[in-house]
């Protein structure tokens, strides 16, 4: 598992989590390049706080953290992100995306 926070600092709740669960399909042409590009672009977005990721060769769970719903919406409608989403059915056999509000957060029992 990988977790990376912007400025190496976990956010203080409340904040938002976008949870993306996926299983890769057979045709992955261009996937790795687009995935790397989207990570780079997401990290440049206003309101981006960090991410956690668990991956296996056939899929995984990716959680991106955001300051507010407005930041998520701006990234959702970004044309470059739209280009990647347009290829999702080619690359994934299954995917599920959810948005959650994080009301509290703890590290080793200590509330942030």
Image (tube, rainbow, N blue to C red):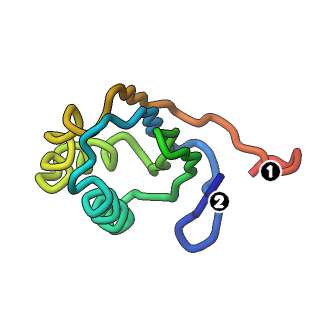
Q: Which residue is pictured at 52% across the width and 39% down the height?
A: 61
Name the element at disc 1. strand
Q: Is residue 111 left or right of residue 35?
A: right
Helix, strand or loop at mark 2: loop
Dot 1: few (<14), some (14–19), or many (≥20) neighbours within 10 Å?
few
List x then y, in percent, for residue 41: 29, 65
Return the residue found at the far bottom. Answer: 7
The crowd level at tag 2 (other Cα within 10 Å; few <14, some 14-19, many 20+) is: some
Q: Is residue 23 above or below residue 62?
A: above
As drawn, the label of residue 27 is none
103 shown above or below 37: above
- Residue 106 in the image: state x and y as whole percent: 77, 45
Specify the quadrant of the image occupied by residue 38.
bottom left
Residue at horizontal 52%, vertical 33%?
101
If you read the primary sequence from the N terminus, does the residue marked by circle 2 or circle 1 appear first?
2
Residue 27, quarter of picture: top left
* Label 2 sits on residue: 10
Q: CA distance from mark 2 to mark 1?
A: 9 Å
Q: Residue lying furthest front in this view?
A: 26
Relative to 84, is 6 on the left or the right? right
Q: Quadrant of residue 33?
A: bottom left
Q: Are the residues tagged 2 and 1 within 8 Å (C-beta)?
A: yes
- The structure residue drawn at horizontal position 58% and vertical position 63%, both measured from the top left corner, is 4
Residue at image point 55% right, 44% down: 56
Task: Measuring from the top left, give residue 8's x and y in whole percent.
Answer: 62, 71
Q: Which residue is mark 1?
A: 107
Depth check: 91 or 35 in front? 91
Residue 93 or residue 47, whichever sits in front: 93
Asked whether 18 or 89 is in front, the reply is: 89
17 horizontally vs 107: left or right: left
Q: Position of residue 105 (x, y in %)?
A: 71, 43
Marker count (numbered):
2
């Amino acid at each position: 598992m990988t977790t990376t926070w912007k400025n190496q600092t976990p956010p203080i709740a409340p904040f938002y989590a976008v949870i993306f669960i996926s299983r890769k399909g057979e045709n992955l042409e261009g996937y790795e390049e687009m995935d790397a590009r989207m990570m780079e672009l997401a990290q440049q977005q206003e309101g981006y706080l960090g991410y956690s990721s668990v991956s296996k060769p056939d899929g995984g769970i990716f959680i991106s953290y955001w300051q507010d719903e407005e930041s998520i919406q701006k990234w959702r409608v970004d044309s470059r992100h739209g280009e990647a989403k347009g290829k999702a059915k080619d690359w994934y056999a299954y995917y599920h995306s959810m948005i959650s509000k994080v009301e509290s957060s703890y590290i080793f029992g200590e509330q942030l």
